[in-house]
Amino acid sequence: MVLFALITWQVAVEGPLFDADVRLGRALFGTGPTAPAELLADLGNMTVALPVLAAAIGYVLVRDRRQWRAALTAVLTMAAVPALVVPLKAWIARPAPLEPGTGWYPSGHTATATVAYCAAALLVTPYLRRRWAMPVAVVLIGATAIGLVLRGYHWPLDVLGSLCLFGALPAMLNSICRRRSSSRTRTG
């Protein structure tokens, strides 16, 4: 949260970190192949990320209906994304990199990808033989962030700020899920 506060402050006052961000963004926009970068950016769309989370919730509830608290926690965590992002975008009113308008900080696509993919991974991991879900989620989030910057949809700090803000929510979800599962574990 401290890093998020620092980044937000720098973006809001257009400090030295802001200037470096603009230079880096301008150097990165349009680099790399367009179609793959667009595909990566789209991983953060709600039309892509929410069905992944819904599928994970459905899978877990079919396997064990007692997991309804974990599923509800994932849904509420996902609902926190627009509840936090929309007011922040309005307050900061950061101009877009390549389009007219304001309201680009923090990145809602990055936040959506972070929460949806991490929550999905945390929900399904107990049912997997190997622990591959979280590394896949991290790759999808990173790919989303890269695509958003390369296509010029977001400045690099928009993406980093969103990662800092929402990176803690999946950890909280994991804590809730572990507390829940350990309370049912037999002892002795």
Image (cartoon, grey):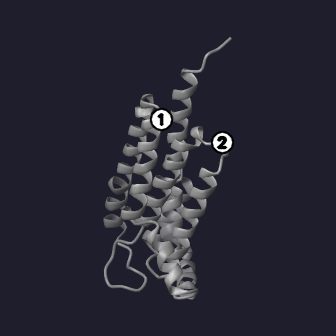
Label 2: element kind: loop
Q: Is residue 21 above or below residue 187?
A: below
Q: What residue lies at 66% left-to-right and 46% top-to-bottom?
A: 131
Judge from the rendering whether residue 3 lies leftward or rightward of residue 63; answer left or right. Answer: right
Q: Is residue 125 visible?
A: yes
Task: Estimate the x, y position of residue 100 in percent, counting from the top left.
Answer: 32, 84
Q: What residue lies at 55% left-to-right and 54% top-to-bottom?
A: 2
Task: Estimate the x, y position of residue 76 in percent, counting from the top left.
Answer: 37, 43
Give amino acid for label 1. Arg
Q: Is residue 128 above or below residue 19?
A: above
- Quadrant housing residue 51: bottom left
Q: What residue lies at 45% left-to-right and 76% top-to-bottom?
A: 154
Number of marks:
2
Task: Estimate the x, y position of residue 48 in percent, counting from the top left.
Answer: 41, 63
- Viewer-closest of 75 and 136: 136
Give amino acid for label 2. Arg
- Viewer-closest of 95 and 170: 170
Judge from the rendering whether residue 14 lies leftward or rightward of residue 138; answer left or right. Answer: left
Q: What residue lies at 46% left-to-right and 47% top-to-bottom?
A: 56
Label 1: element kind: helix
Q: How many residues crowd mark 2 within 10 Å: few (<14), some (14–19), many (20+)?
A: few
- Viewer-closest of 146 and 164: 146
Task: Estimate the x, y position of residue 182 in percent, counting from the top left.
Answer: 58, 25
Point out the residue furthest to the front here. 62
As drawn, the label of residue 129 is 2
Marks 1/2 in contact by CB < 8 Å: the verdict is no
Q: Is residue 109 above or below residue 119?
A: below
Give the residue number, with chain letter if any, for mark 1.
Answer: 63
Image quarter of the C terminus? top right
